[in-house]
């Protein structure tokens, strides 16, 4: 099966040319399919991950994902003979089957298209559907063979990228070969820029492979030269960030590519920051957290999507949580599903860490949860809202339990002294033996403890969505703080 990060639209059932706003309704439809089918190939967590990737890369025209359809125009009649109407209709049904997880049906329909027409565009798209279906069924070799047949004819950027997506995970050597082919095959400036983007996407994925893949010197030198040339801004951004990761020392010398017309842009500053190191890059994203510059927004959203992935998938992801905290502390607004989810998962990660290592989460995390909860309440789609509310309620309860545990530890640390001083302060005979300064100091401290505890309990109750057992813990703590406050006040009155 194609990894979710490379096929988020296939997971949700969203066509490649559908706008980002359609992702939420697609999530709802996929959720209903999930509930209706005991043998569904995905879980709710997979749908959530797919939605996160679509939102995180919404502005990224170069996002490395499998596209169905590869060429949406083939579904119209323009340029296709009327005699191919039946083939076009069958192709449309095959695409619908792919997007509703009916992959075996899609295989049969795609084969029907190949029998019905000799039109290259229709046949290429049918081969693409066939490849997607085979890949989702786990038959990657058959999928690659279908795509290799599709790319033999007229150059199609999306088909080439789809082949790269499959090759990266199944046949890295083929992916490396394809990368050099793309550069050699491009004739026009537009095709060369497209080829550069394909090569960059492919090698970026190969970087994550267990084997070491060295970028050929010819490609590296070509990329170095291109960075200083008049590229469009998207290609400049993608190329610069790739070289910043893989050829950082060279890129860090801005004079090497100072001839670029984009040298004074915010994108160039971002490239330089990444070349200097990952922490410097994160500092840049934090410093520009309110920037609306397209490439910066794209980089920020891509980073947030990666951080969410880490906290979803990894058993311990405190590193990701630390970077997420920096972004949120830097002023990241809670204005999207991913931005809300980042807050929830970060609090969860920190609470889990403190359960094992001790400590109490910061009070400001309650504000993060409140902001996330407020955003979730405003989601119109019931399926989507409910799927996130479950996670939200669980994390709120986790935080509340950790808060109660730490407050109870504090209560146990002073309760004996407080009860003793309170008992002595109420009797004239024993009151004279008290050190009044120390007794008042204790009462003031415990009263402040009670007041801060009461305030936090009210804030936690305001978050809602807590398990009944947790509500009981908070009620018990509220009774404790009320007792402490009353005893502290009485000591202060008597002394």
Image: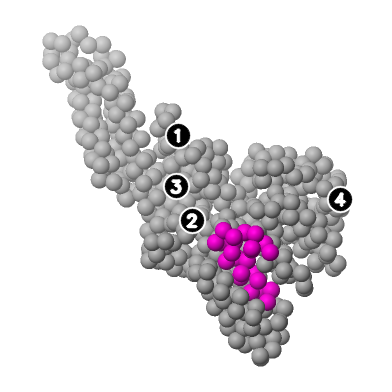
| Residue sitting at x 66%, y 42% | 210
Q: Dots 1 and 4: beta carbons under 8 Å?
A: no
Say which element carries label 3: helix
Q: Could you tell me how far apart the alpha carbons at marks 2 and 3 are, in whole angstroms?
A: 17 Å
Give the mark, 1 or 2, whose residue is nearer the N terminus: 2
Q: Nearer the viewer, residue 22 or 440?
A: 22
Give the mark, 1 or 4, whose residue is nearer the N terminus: 4
Residue pointed to by mark 3? 344
| Residue sitting at x 78%, y 55% | 177
Q: How is the image coloured?
A: one colour
**In this view, the mark in front (1 or 4):** 4
The x, y position of residue 78, in whole percent, is: 68, 86
Q: Could you tell me how far apart the alpha carbons at marks 1 and 2 are, in whole angstroms?
A: 24 Å
- Single out the residue that lies furthest toward the top: 433
Q: Nearer the viewer, residue 121 or 32?
A: 121
**In this view, the mark in front (3 or 1):** 1
The x, y position of residue 200, in whole percent, is: 74, 54
Label placed on residue 353: 1
Q: Dots 4 and 2: beta carbons under 8 Å?
A: no
Q: Could you tell me how far apart the alpha carbons at marks 3 and 4 are, in whole angstroms?
A: 45 Å
């Amino acid at each position: 099966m194609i990894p979710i990060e490379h096929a988020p639209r296939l997971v949700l059932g969203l066509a490649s040319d559908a706008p980002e706003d359609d992702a939420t309704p697609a999530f709802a439809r996929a959720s209903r399919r999930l509930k209706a089918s005991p043998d569904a190939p995905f879980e709710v967590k997979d749908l959530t991950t797919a939605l996160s990737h679509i939102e995180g890369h919404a502005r990224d025209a170069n996002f490395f994902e499998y596209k169905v359809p590869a060429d949406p125009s083939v579904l119209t009649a323009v340029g296709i003979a009327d005699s191919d109407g039946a083939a076009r209709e069958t192709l449309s049904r095959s695409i619908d089957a792919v997007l509703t997880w009916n992959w075996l049906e899609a295989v049969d329909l795609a084969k029907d298209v190949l029998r019905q027409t000799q039109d290259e565009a229709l046949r290429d798209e049918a081969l693409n559907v066939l490849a997607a279906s085979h890949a989702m069924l786990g038959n990657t070799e058959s999928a690659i063979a279908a795509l290799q047949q599709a790319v033999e004819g007229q150059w199609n950027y999306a088909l080439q990228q789809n082949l790269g997506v499959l090759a990266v995970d199944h046949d890295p050597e083929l992916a490396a070969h394809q990368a050099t082919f793309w550069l050699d095959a491009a004739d026009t400036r537009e095709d060369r820029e497209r080829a550069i983007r394909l090569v960059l996407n492919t090698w970026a994925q190969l970087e994550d492979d267990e084997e070491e893949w060295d970028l050929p010197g010819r490609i590296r030198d070509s990329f170095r030269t291109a960075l200083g040339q008049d590229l469009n801004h998207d290609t400049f951004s993608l190329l610069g960030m790739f070289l910043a990761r893989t050829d950082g020392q060279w890129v860090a010398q801005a004079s090497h590519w100072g001839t670029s017309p984009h040298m004074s842009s915010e994108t160039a500053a971002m490239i330089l920051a990444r070349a200097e190191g990952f922490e410097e890059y994160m500092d840049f994203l934090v410093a520009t957290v309110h920037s609306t510059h397209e490439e910066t927004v794209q980089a920020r959203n891509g980073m947030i999507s990666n951080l969410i992935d880490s906290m979803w998938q990894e058993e311990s992801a405190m590193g990701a949580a630390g970077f997420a905290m920096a972004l949120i502390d830097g002023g990241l607004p809670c204005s999207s599903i991913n931005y809300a989810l980042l807050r929830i998962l970060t609090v969860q990660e920190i609470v889990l860490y403190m359960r094992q290592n001790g400590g109490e989460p910061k009070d400001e995390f309650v504000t993060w949860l409140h902001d996330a909860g407020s955003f979730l309440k405003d989601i119109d789609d019931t399926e989507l809202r409910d799927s996130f509310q479950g996670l939200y309620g669980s994390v709120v309860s986790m935080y509340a339990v950790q808060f109660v545990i730490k407050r109870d530890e504090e209560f146990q640390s002073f309760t004996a002294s407080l009860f003793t001083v309170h008992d002595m302060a109420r009797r004239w005979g024993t009151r004279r033996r008290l050190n009044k300064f120390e007794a008042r100091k204790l009462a003031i401290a415990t009263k402040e403890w009670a007041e801060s505890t009461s305030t936090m309990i009210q804030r936690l109750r305001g978050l809602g969505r807590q398990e009944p057992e947790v509500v009981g813990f908070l009620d018990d703590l509220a009774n404790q703080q009320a007792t402490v406050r009353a005893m502290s006040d009485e000591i202060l009155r008597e002394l």
